Image: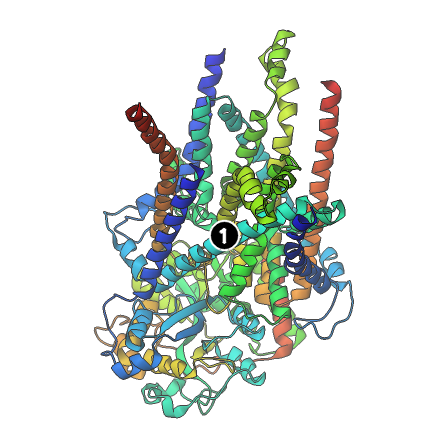
Amino acid sequence: MKKKKRYFGVTIMILALVFFYLPIITVVVFSFNGSKSLTVMKGFSLQWYERLFRDSQMMDSVYTTVLVAVIATVVSTIAGTLAAVGLSKSRRVVRDLVLQINDFPIMNPEIVTAIGLMLFFITLGVERGLLTMILAHIAFCIPYVILSVMPKIRSLDPNLADAAMDLGATPWQALTKVIVPEITPGILSGALIAFTMSFDDFIISYFVTGRGVKNLSIMAYTMSKRVNPTINAISSLIVGVITLILVLINLVPFISSKIKNKKNLTEV
Amino acid sequence: MKKFSQLAVPYIVWSVIMLLLPMVLVVFYAFTDSGNAIMTFTFTIRHFVRFFTDPDFLLVLWRSLKIAIKTTIACVLLGYPVAYFIANSSDRQRNMLVLAITLPTWINMLVRTYAWIGLLSKGGLFSTLLGFFGLKDVEILYTEGAVLLGMVYNFLPFMILQINTSLCTMDHSLLAAAADLGADGVHTFLKVTLPLSLPGVISGISLVFLPAVSSFFIPKLLGGGQYFLIGNVIENQFITVGEWNFGSAISVIMAMIMMYSMYLVRHIEARNSGNARKES
Amino acid sequence: MKKRVLVLAAILAGVVLAAAGCGNSGSGSGSSSGGSADSKNENKFAGQTLHIYNWGEYTGENTISDFEKRTGARILMDEFESNEQMYIKVANGDAYDLLVPSDYMIERLLKEDRLQKLDKSLLTCMDSLSDEVRGLPYDPENDYTVPYFWGTVGIVYDKNKVDIADLEKDGFGIFLNTKYKGDIYLYDSERDSFMMALKYLGYSMNTDDPEELNAAYEFLLQCVNTMEPEIVTDEIIDNMAQGRKALGLIYSGDATYVMAENEDMGYYLPESGTNIWSDAMVIPKNAEHVELAHEFINFILEHDPATDVSTYVGYTSPNKEVMEELSGEGGEFEGINAYIPRSGNPNDEVFSYNENSRKVISELWSKVKIAASNAN
């Protein structure tokens, strides 16, 4: 009985994985296409990668995407964590109100958030460009960080910080040496979500940018009208980098524990 | 104590300015006739009237909801078995599978959608496959099917992960208890597992339905210029037509619909978990 | 362990940033087809960034990199799909150094006082212009504009699928001919779609008569309700080059590209008249790098860059020599009728800007698109 279920489950799982990875593999394969077609493979060539690196607009958009994502992640993680800690100690009324506002970019359709921010910048006369893109990204990333950190803070002993301060720690030390280490998993996952949201973003960036500043998504969107295999090249690179990062992240603890074991053995 | 709560103050200010104010602005534009400058304005509800009295717009809204519902149902039906399999795998297998499912979501959404254009166009993999079954020259790209496929592709991982999480955090001793009481596999599933995993399904639905309704680049990329959903209408009003007041009104309407559906969904979940508690 | 993950991620992020940044500053290693590097210019413009707002796919393979190499400046180019899209961004404060709008949009920008006069002492390109594009009605003295491309709007068709007799009989009415149902492209441009309808009905494309505009609206509605058209913009280029449909409304430049790629394709201009258009470079009042913008204008009309651009995109160059070379013997576009805009047909018109009709057309076209979408 159980074995039967496993076969069924395994089949479904494999189908799912094929479904998810088929386009990705196709993209990687076609990025080496000798011809311009998106449907027929003719020979092997690195021409699209060459074109990619020569295309300053493309490289600019990659640079912009990474820059904005890194800045947004760092700022929103720090700001979000501090805000979450502060909110957990605030009055119930204040906390509920802020969390409600926090919900806006998460609950609202992205296009509404995008329009709101665009109208906001235009009304204030702020020139749209890289700065507005970064500000917008920070604005929609912080809520995710807070959402990620809050549950961890709630599970903490509320007297922890007090205890630390009673023992002579300054509030800042209590924060950094006591609270933060305890909630680190929440901070990390929040940072990860923030980075993904920012790296992935299209709609909000599309509406709040100006003066030719584009991120990767906008670039792909404008290039989608013509057959443009250079997108395959950049996509494959992204796939490669992400796979590399994931492999490394999973290998690092593995390797470090092996080194630790070796150390233990030699020490003994 | 007081010192710590002060930490929140900068964010309170920031969130009011950057999150609340923009929303207020959208509502403001929706109810006024100011054009694109905010200097002179008159209050009006004519934009809302215009939207609700035009059968064309209402039809677009209806079609957007329809395809979002179809996407959500597809994601639930396809996602649940996958999530079930993952949840019942060994710890190490589960981690790997979760990673395998999450990896595509880290690749830029537009890039992922663009990948389907090649696969679905004439001469691509899918039409070649269909050719083997005798269906020649079938146009898959630029149809509703293509848009549905694109949406499911983009949102399915979220559904799977949400269901998986709730299946994993479920109290497994209840399963053993049910078995002890004589329930067979199917019954255990229907009466214990399914209801307890419902929160995951619900939160998966909210992660799929919302973006599906308001999406505009998936319809544009895979549906072509004539596949207009409500998200495309809004984008069109802002980017090409320049009617920002009307566009804001449609946005408000869409946001209202979203909030109401979320409220409904949360209400169902609350009632359901209340029942579950009663039964167990 | 978690710390190591953080450090690793930070390092990787840094590496990617650095790599992208390197690719950034060292751009333009392509072959040079522009003139020799002018060292005096390189110093003058080094470090500046030229913000251009242009049509999509409107520059040649090496245009940007050549210009960047020659002047030491960078180009940040934003793309729009329609004049209307461009106008909204510009009117709401987006500051660009150079825009490339179409004739009627230039009229509007001039009327709203958004453009600045060109400094003719900085321009070296005016003599290279064809007579037909010099001193156009919207700017008789070329005080504000220098043409970028020009052409007509017509019907691209598959010679194997479409009977030329049908084209000659129907003109633009072929878009209602159910013989080609499901096999046509409409262009997602409000003014070109309305132009086609108005011309077919025998009206002027510049009319603001509500009855005439409504008749055009009905024409388009009938088309989307009975003909199952695909409404596209640039997608038509590669798709018609691959012969995906029988016919479509298209710009002459795109038709040139299509016909150069696919011998089975032809280009037809109805006798009832069409639109002769021009896109020109203008400098908005709030431009930052005015001198650099002038430099670009000169650059793009020089022989080699103009050849690069016209060959790659397919649109007709305003540079007389280049146009004659490319259409003449041994030229890239020899024998392609789409490349040389038609002259002498009294029914051909140039668009002029009209605030009243603009609003109406904009709203009606939105409705047409929604109707098309709902008809599926």
Residue tagged by mark 1? A74
In the rendering, at what x and y percent does residue A9 appear?
47, 22
What's the amino acid at mark 1? Val
Q: Residue B50, can we see it?
A: yes
In the rendering, at what x and y percent does residue B243 appear?
65, 67
Q: Is residue A130 above or below residue A203?
A: below
Of C49 and C355, nearer the camera is: C49
Rendering quarter of residue C205: bottom right
Residue density around tag 1, few if under 14, some if 14–19, many if 20 or more, within 10 Å: some
- Mark 1 lies on a secondary structure that is helix
In the rendering, at what x and y percent does residue A66 appear?
43, 55
Q: Residue at x 58, y 55 (%)?
A: A139
Rendering quarter of residue C19: bottom left
Q: Residue at x 55, y 82 (%)?
A: C114
Of C21 and A116, nearer the camera is: C21
Of B181 and A75, nearer the camera is: A75
Q: Is residue C129 above or below residue A31?
A: below
In the rendering, at what x and y percent does residue C230 appear?
50, 56
Residue that lies at the very extreme toward the front in this rendered image: A168
The answer to whether residue C71 is left or right of residue B161 is left
Q: Residue A206, can we see it?
A: no
Q: Residue at x 53, y 24 (%)?
A: B84
Q: Colour scheme in the image? A: rainbow
Of A139 and C73, nearer the camera is: A139
The answer to whether residue A94 is left or right of residue A16 is right
Q: What is the chain identity of the residue bearing mark 1?
A: A
Q: Residue at x 43, y 73 (%)?
A: C52
Quarter of the image with the C terminus of chain A in it: top left
